[in-house]
Amino acid sequence: MIPIDDTPLCRDGKVLILAYDHGLEHGPVDFEGVPESADPRRIFEAATHPAVTSVAVQKGLAEAYYPSYEESVSLLAKLNGTSNLWMGEPDSSVNCSVEYAAELGASSVGFTIYGGSNNEIEMAEEFRDAQEAAREHDLPVVMWSYPRGQGLKNDTKPSTISYAARLALELGADVAKVKHPGSHSAMEDAVRMAGKTKVVMSGGSKRSDRAFLRSVKETIDAGGNGLAVGRNVWQRENPERILDALEAVIFEEATVDEALAAVE
Ligand code: FBP
């Protein structure tokens, strides 16, 4: 574990990652509601909002678009990822090395682990290589800790999310990105299990402003350190508005009502 509070991934010890690897993970279907969201420049522009501590993209987008934003945005290079065309047991190919991520200007790296998948062993070994290489470059490591696979019926039940958070601590991640387990106490338990590893909530599919902000607030109140979010920001017509509200909830201790009132 390395101290990450003074790295670009954090602001006041908190994290707000704007994730945009969906073109790979889910495919163009995610861009249908707001067709402009297929243009990566829209998301890099949104990432210049002061609430966003880093934008998470795959290597190709980093190569093609980050050079225009390196002064105003911090880059989290997602090292592995799979397309939705893959129909096998959950797995993720390593698409970028830590060395190349550093060359691209990344100030942190991200890696998915599907605990419980038949491919967990290989994925954990790949994570080991990435985590140790990241240490050589002083780059914080964010684990997308998503238990799933043929043995797991419910990937958001509290005990599974607590295990996901713990797995990140055990394997040496600085930040664990986990799904919301459904209640304040379950999130509190996940945070406890993660120990010194920071816990951030994974955004999930698009919801109403209030429902989404409520789960973010619950995460912060449970001791979580922020959010890694994609669709709930850039599938909105006005990403800046929800980022203003998120800034209030995550960094300014606002209630959901206060955050909503401020953006009305
Ligand atoms: P969202 O906020 O849109 O859920 O994005 C977070 C994220 O982890 C992305 O980085 C990733 O592409 C996606 O969710 C994966 O979601 P899932 O595997 O649950 O479909």
Image: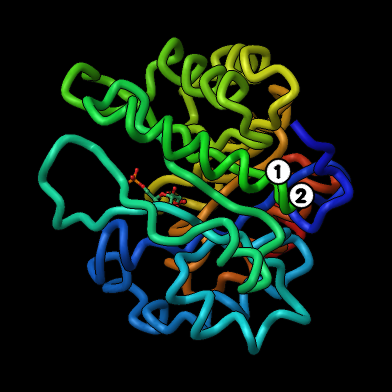
- Amino acid type for the residue under numbered disc 1: Arg
Whether the residues at callouts 2 and 1 have beta carbons within 8 Å, the answer is: yes
Query: Looking at the image, is 58 positioned above or below residue 78?
Result: below
Mark 1 Cβ inside 8 Å of ligand 1: no
Q: Residue furthest bottom?
A: 68
- Residue at the left extreme, as displayed: 87
Across and down, in percent, residue 95 comes to 39, 60
Q: Considering the numbered disc 2 on the image, is that residue within a helix, a strand or a loop?
A: loop
Res. 156 image quadrant: top left
Along the line of sight, the residue nearer the viewer: 98 or 237:
98
Rendering coords of residue 144 (x, y %): 48, 40
Closer-to-camera residue (112/231): 112
- Callout 2 environment at 10 Å: few (<14), some (14 to 19), or many (20+)? some
According to the picture, the residue beneath numbered tag 1 turns out to be 135
Q: Tell whether circle 2 marks a residue whose Cβ is less than 8 angstroms from ligand 1.
A: no
The residue under the point 54% across, 37% down is: 177
Residue 198 in percent (x, y) is at 70, 31
Question: Which residue corresponds to mark 2?
Answer: 138
Q: Name the foreground residue: 142 vs 189.
A: 142
Say if residue 37 shows up in the picture.
yes
**Residue type marked 2:** Asp
> Residue 155, which numbered label?
none
On screen, residue 3 above or below 56: above
Question: Left or right: where does residue 184 sit relative to residue 32?
Answer: right
Seen at 76% across and 60% down, the residue is 262
Q: Residue at x 49, y 85 (%)?
A: 64
**Relative to 68, is 130 on the left or the right?**
left
How packed is label 1: few (under 14 Cα within 10 Å), some, or many (20 or more)? Answer: some
Count of numbered badges drawn on the protein: 2
